[in-house]
Image (cartoon, helix red, strand yellow):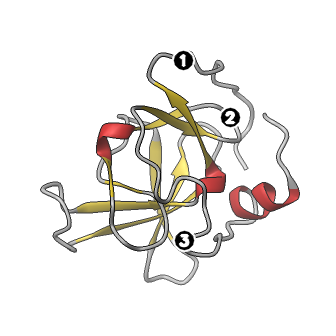
Amino acid sequence: MNNLTSEESRIIVGKGTEPPFSGEYDNFYKEGTYICRRCNNPLFDSKTKFDAGCGWPAFDEHFEGAVTRKTDADGRRTEILCSNCGGHLGHVFEGEHMTDKDTRHCVNSLSIKFFPKDQTFPPVLHDTKL
């Protein structure tokens, strides 16, 4: 797995949340791929990113098999995790009617890394899940 800063670890391993409107990818719209910061697993295509106005990067679709849903500890929300390493990405919300897909994957910027479309990202790292 990639080495994480203490703040990245607090978010990804400790299932934390970064403050709204503080993440580097909140208001970021370039063409490319977002991968898991912990294991390099490709998660989201930039074409699925949209401005939800929520303070975190929002995507209405993920790559097939890249994201796992799990009922959050609070029992009300649905957590999203990297399917490869189990790292915490954020939460998913449905029924808000923000896009045609009616889904908002609300993701912490510290859980992901962006690679422009013409840049190759590093290979996926496999290890035991969290």
Q: Are marks 3 and 1 in contact (CB under 8 Å)?
A: no
Residue at figure coordinates x 68%, y 70% from the top left: 16
How many other residues sit within 10 Å of disc 1, few (<14), some (14-19) or many (≥20)? Answer: few
- Residue pictured at 57% horizontal, 32% vertical: 41
Specify whether 127 is left or right of 120.
Answer: right
Residue 101 image position (x, y, % from top left): 17, 55
Taking 19 as reference, is 63 above or below it?
above
Q: Nearer the viewer, mark 2 or mark 1?
A: 1
Mark 3–mark 1 Cα distance, whole angstroms, equals 27 Å
Q: Position of residue 58 (x, y in %)?
A: 39, 58
First in sequence, mark 3 or 1: give its number: 3
At mark 1, the secondary structure is: loop
Check disc 1 and report the residue beneath it.
119
Relative side of 16 to 66, left or right:
right
User: Dot 2: what SS?
Assistant: loop
Tell me the CA gap for discs 3 and 2: 25 Å
Where does label 3 land, which residue?
21
Q: Amino acid at mark 2?
A: Cys
Please, what is the three-letter code of the amino acid marked with disc 3? Phe
Label located before the other in sequence (3 or 2): 3
Q: How many marks?
A: 3
Where residue 6 sits, quadrant-wise, is: bottom right
